[in-house]
Structures are given as structure tokens and as C-alpha cells.
Amino acid sequence: MYSGEFERIGRRLFAEHLVGGNFGNISVRDGMNGFYIKRTGAYLDVATEPLFVPLSGEVPAGASSEYRVHREIYTKTGHLAVVHAHPPVAVALSLVRDTIRPEDSEGIMFCPEIKVVCGEPGSQELADAVANALVSSKLVIARGHGTFAAGKTLDEAYLYTSLAEHACRVLAIKHHFIRS
């Protein structure tokens, strides 16, 4: 279940250089009791059967190391899909800013402010920070780690992931021209 959809979104993430290697993860809420998430170490662009993780209780062996973040998002928000990626310019900008304010038209329209939160990858601290930010947003960046984008569908979450990297590239290019 969902392996084809995960693979399709994973291929887009690789094509846009928003993930590399076996980094990043994808999940989809399934009813009121849990969600499906990619397996730890699985490549996003290869069809592998995701694992079902309940919203409470034991987590099956092999679930993504970021299952805590996904669990908190589904527990605290109404989002139905999550994409976690490592877009390089967004990650770099998160190292020097606490909030990113896009200046391109799409960024201003869809996500005028992107919060940057802290926490070790895979930790409950990161899970709480990301989920709290996504209560009122569809996009957040974990400092030095990557984006977490959420929405009603994986396509919507993917679009916010792509939007984050585009907006951050525009800011970086603008800064380069100002310094020149």
C-alpha cells in the first residue's frame, strides 16, 4: 500500500536534488490510528513497501528514524501527508537564519514565513518543535537538517518542499548579487 505513490514522489525529490542517497522520508496518514512511512535506509525513488506505524504504542522495527516527527505531526495537526527532504540551499540558509521570509512571488503567496526549528534528528525535541510549527503552517525547516512539509496529499507536501528550496535559492542568488 502506497509504495507506488511514495516512489513517484521520491523520484521527483531526486530529480530536483531535494534528497540524496537514502536520506529523507515520506508518510501518509491512514485513518485515525496511524500512518504509513518509508522504511529506514530505503531509497525514496525505489518502490518498497512502507511500514504502518500506530499513533501510540510500539513502533515496528525498520520504520524511518524520523517516525517521532511524523507521529507528532499527525497527532497535533490535521495534515494527512508529510515529506521530509534535505534541500541543500534551504538547509544552508537554516544555519544562518531563525526565520526565512521568501521574496519571490510564489514564496510570498504560499509561505510568506518559514520557521526554522531546532532539535537532533530523530529526537522527541525535534518532533515537538516541527509538529508545533506545522500546527499553523505547511512548511518548517529543521536547522541544518532539512524541510518538513505537510498537506492533504503527498503532492501538496512535495510542492511545499520544492517551494522552500526555490525560495531559498532566490534569496541566496539575491544576496550574491548584492555582494557583487
Image (cartoon, grey):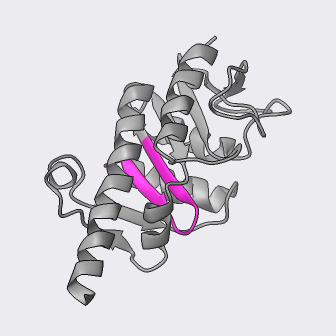
Please give the name of the residue rendered at 55% of the width and 55% of the height, measured from the top-left corner.
128
Q: Is residue 36 above or below residue 105?
A: above
Please give the name of the residue rendered at 57% of the width and 24% of the height, measured from the top-left corner.
6
Assess whether residue 138 is covered by the magenta stretch: yes
Q: Is residue 137 above or below residue 43?
A: below
Q: Is residue 8 left or right of residue 52?
A: left
Please give the name of the residue rendered at 18% of the width and 48% of the height, measured from the top-left corner.
106
Assess whether residue 110 is covered by the magenta stretch: no
**Residue 138 appears in the figure:** no
Please give the name of the residue rendered at 59% of the width and 15% of the height, measured from the top-left corner.
4
Relative depth, front residue between 87 and 33? 87
Name of the residue lying farthest toward the front: 180
Dominant SS of magenta comes to strand
Q: Quadrant of the C terminus?
A: bottom left
Name of the residue lying farthest toward the top: 1
Name of the residue lying farthest toward the bottom: 179
Q: Quadrant of the N terminus?
A: top right
Query: Which range of residues does the magenta coloring cover?
Result: 137-149
Q: Is residue 107 above or below residue 94?
A: above
Q: Which percent across, then down, holds residue 58?
A: 80, 33
Q: Which percent across, then down, holds residue 36?
A: 63, 24
Q: Quadrant of residue 50?
A: top right
Q: Is residue 174 left or right of residue 124?
A: left
Q: Which percent across, then down, holds residue 108?
A: 16, 55
**Residue 126 appears in the figure:** yes
